[in-house]
């Protein structure tokens, strides 16, 4: 069996310089990403921008004076327009999203350090009718984390303390503004891992993860945050602190209110504390990247991987040749395979018995090759190669962003038809003479697909020269109609935000939307929290 492992491993060129450097580079670029208005030039635009609601008070100097009385001076960023002294450029990073697609014009950013301060801020805003947008690491991809107009930005970044960690149960209790990667390092030193991981880990906050119910690359093994989050501390729009920081795994005392806030995208309350179960770090991890000739074979390989490695299979990700091209161009990584393929798959197994796991992975790879399901593969030989293989997958969003302004669709569709939408959209763009695959100089530069295929989740991306209506109109609402016709979800993991709020009806019935609105009214009767988004 081991010979198969070697067959995969030998004579494959190394992926790149050093794994940790590559991963750190992605993380630090994320963390340090300058959000200048010039990033994608003046063509960037905020579309579907609803009109400002006249029910919200326009912020005045008196309001800022009030915040100065309840918060430390260094936690307030106010521009001269509202009586402060901050250069408006300092607020740009809070006003523009990661994709540089959505941009607001907030003149005030508040960065409280305590739950009490969050409560005082919200109480005042609610009384005065001032709109507020909660913001974590601002890595969201649906325009939910930035103001639409002049909402006050309530940034959680100063709430970044670990409150407690129980090594016996693996239960972590922390502030909402803790950065996911830092939490991963903390529990990693104690032989545990976070139950979720995503490419934005160097910047995103655990509170933002909970607010978006983020999925990511560990979902296949550890499931949804609805399962691993045990408790939340949430401040409601009127300032009420809902302390539900349970560390219990089992608690059936009535309605489980915390579930409402998981995935509510800052529309019901501000999450200030999180209690979360962290799994033991697996002692044996194997990662392989495979070259696959067709999407049909990507599915066959998944079927076989589940059959042969079911209990240790921890990730099954895929990407197409266009994604690979962008990654190899923009990351310091080399293709671990000896030639190019239409599709690539990353398989990870995680377990506790190295010999057993090596044997299982080896047997799987051997069978995949023998049956001609995959044409080539490379099995990582050490942690450094594992990191580089993951950096390749996780580097896709950033690489596409460097290729040009990127339209992102994040859908759940039954796996057999998952990739059809990519070809369909490329064909529509070609017919409209907006795209010629492989040819430069067109309004659309790239159409590609990747994602968490093990979860039935495709990321369809269209990279353009600029965001413009004639391109958008090709796939909106077409993509949503397509997904709806397959009983899929128009948002598998990124959320609704501003981008999809007008399209919710493609995934939810009128009755469900009506109940969502009633829940919003119950928690936020004045609608001050993250207005214009979600519902
Ligand atoms: P933000 O972007 O700041 O906010 C997101 C939403 O949550 C907003 O609506 C905001 O109002 C709300 N919010 C934030 N903090 C709070 C809080 N404390 N209380 C209440 N509401 C709050 N997503 C995935 O699901 N899976 C992935 O694999 C994945 N990979 C990514 C890779 C890259 C490179 C990037 C840029 C993004 C990726 N994302 C992914 C999207 C994004 O990282 C996640 O949605 C993440 O959970 C957002 O966290 P954040 O702290 O940046 O939140
Ligand atoms: C991913 O899986 O890489 C993320 O969800 C980000 C993206 O869709 O680009
Ligand atoms: Zn994803």
Image (cartoon, rainbow, N blue to C red):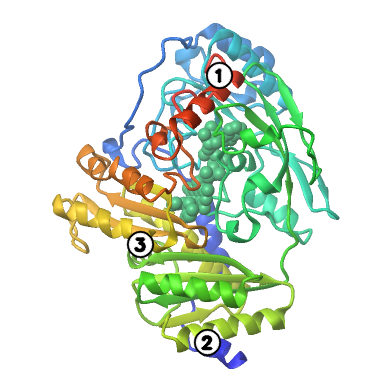
Nearer to me, 491 or 485? 485
Left or right: 248, with 219 as reference point:
right
193 in relation to 247, above or below: below
Q: Earlier in the sequence, mark 2 or mark 1?
A: 2
| Marks 2/3: CA–CA distance | 29 Å
Residue 366: numbered disc: 2
- Which quadrant of the structure image shows residue 76? top right
Residue 436: numbered disc: none
Q: Mark 1 points at which residue?
A: 521
Q: Where is residue 490 in the image (x, y as percent from the top left)?
A: 42, 44
| Count of labels in the image | 3
Residue at image coords 47%, 45% = 33
Q: Mark 3 points at which residue?
A: 326
Q: Where is residue 248 in the image (x, y as percent from the top left)?
A: 81, 43
Name the residue at the top extreme.
62
Nearer to me, 137 or 358? 358
Count neighbours of disc 3 (C-alpha within 10 A) and say few if under 14, some if 14 to 19, many if 20 or more. Answer: many
Residue at image coords 62%, 54% = 223
Secondary structure of residue under mark 2: helix
Q: Position of residue 422 (x, y in %)?
A: 31, 57
Is label 1 within 8 A of ligand 1 (CB to nearest ligand atom)?
no
């Amino acid at each position: 069996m081991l010979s198969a492992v070697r067959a995969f491993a030998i004579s494959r060129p190394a992926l790149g310089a050093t794994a940790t450097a590559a991963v750190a580079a992605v993380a630090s670029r994320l963390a340090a990403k300058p959000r200048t208005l010039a990033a994608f030039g003046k063509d960037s635009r905020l579309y579907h921008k609803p009109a400002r609601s006249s029910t919200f008070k326009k912020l005045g100097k008196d309001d800022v004076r009030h915040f100065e009385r309840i918060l430390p001076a260094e936690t307030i960023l106010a521009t001269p327009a509202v009586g402060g002294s901050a250069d408006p450029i300092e607020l740009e990073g809070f006003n523009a999203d990661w994709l540089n697609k959505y941009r607001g014009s907030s003149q005030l950013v508040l960065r409280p350090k305590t739950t009490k301060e969050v409560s005082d801020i919200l109480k005042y805003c609610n009384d005065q009718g001032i709109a507020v947008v909660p913001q974590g690491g601002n890595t969201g991809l649906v325009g939910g984390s930035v103001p639409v107009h002049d909402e006050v930005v309530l940034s959680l970044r100063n709430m970044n303390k670990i409150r407690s960690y129980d090594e016996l149960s693996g239960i972590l209790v922390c502030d909402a503004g803790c950065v996911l990667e830092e939490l991963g390092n903390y529990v990693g030193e104690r032989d545990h891992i976070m139950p979720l991981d995503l490419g934005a880990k160097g910047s995103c906050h655990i509170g933002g993860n909970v607010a978006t119910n983020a999925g990511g690359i560990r979902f296949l093994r550890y499931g949804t945050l609805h399962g691993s989050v045990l408790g939340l501390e949430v401040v409601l729009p009127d300032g009420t602190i809902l302390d539900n920081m349970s560390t219990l795994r089992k608690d059936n005392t009535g309605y489980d209110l915390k579930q409402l806030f998981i995935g509510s995208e800052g529309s019901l309350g501000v999450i200030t504390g999180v209690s979360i179960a962290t799994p033991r770090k697996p002692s044996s991890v194997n990662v392989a990247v495979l070259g696959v000739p067709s999407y049909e074979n990507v599915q066959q390989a998944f079927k076989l991987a589940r059959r042969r490695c079911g209990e240790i299979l921890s990730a099954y990700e895929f990407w197409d040749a266009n994604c690979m091209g962008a990654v190899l161009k923009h990351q310091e990584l080399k293709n671990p395979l000896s030639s190019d393929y239409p599709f690539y798959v990353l398989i990870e197994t995680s377990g506790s018995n190295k010999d057993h796991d090596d044997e299982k992975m080896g047997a799987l790879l051997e069978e995949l090759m023998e049956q001609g399901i995959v044409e080539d593969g490379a099995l990582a030989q050490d942690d450094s190669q594992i990191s580089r293989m993951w950096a390749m997958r996780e580097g896709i969003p950033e690489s596409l962003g460097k290729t040009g302004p990127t339209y992102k669709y994040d859908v759940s569709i039954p796996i057999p038809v998952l990739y059809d939408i990519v070809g369909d959209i490329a064909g529509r763009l070609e017919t409209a003479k907006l795209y010629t695959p492989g040819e430069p100089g067109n309004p659309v530069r790239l159409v590609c697909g990747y994602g968490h295929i093990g979860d039935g989740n495709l990321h369809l991306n269209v990279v353009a020269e600029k965001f413009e209506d004639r391109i958008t109109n090709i796939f909106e609402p077409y993509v949503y109609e397509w997904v709806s016709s397959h009983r899929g979800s128009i948002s598998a993991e990124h959320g609704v935000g501003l981008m999809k709020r007008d399209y919710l009806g493609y995934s939810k019935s009128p009755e469900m939307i009506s109940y969502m609105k009633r829940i919003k009214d119950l928690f936020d009767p004045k609608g001050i929290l993250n207005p214009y988004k979600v519902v």
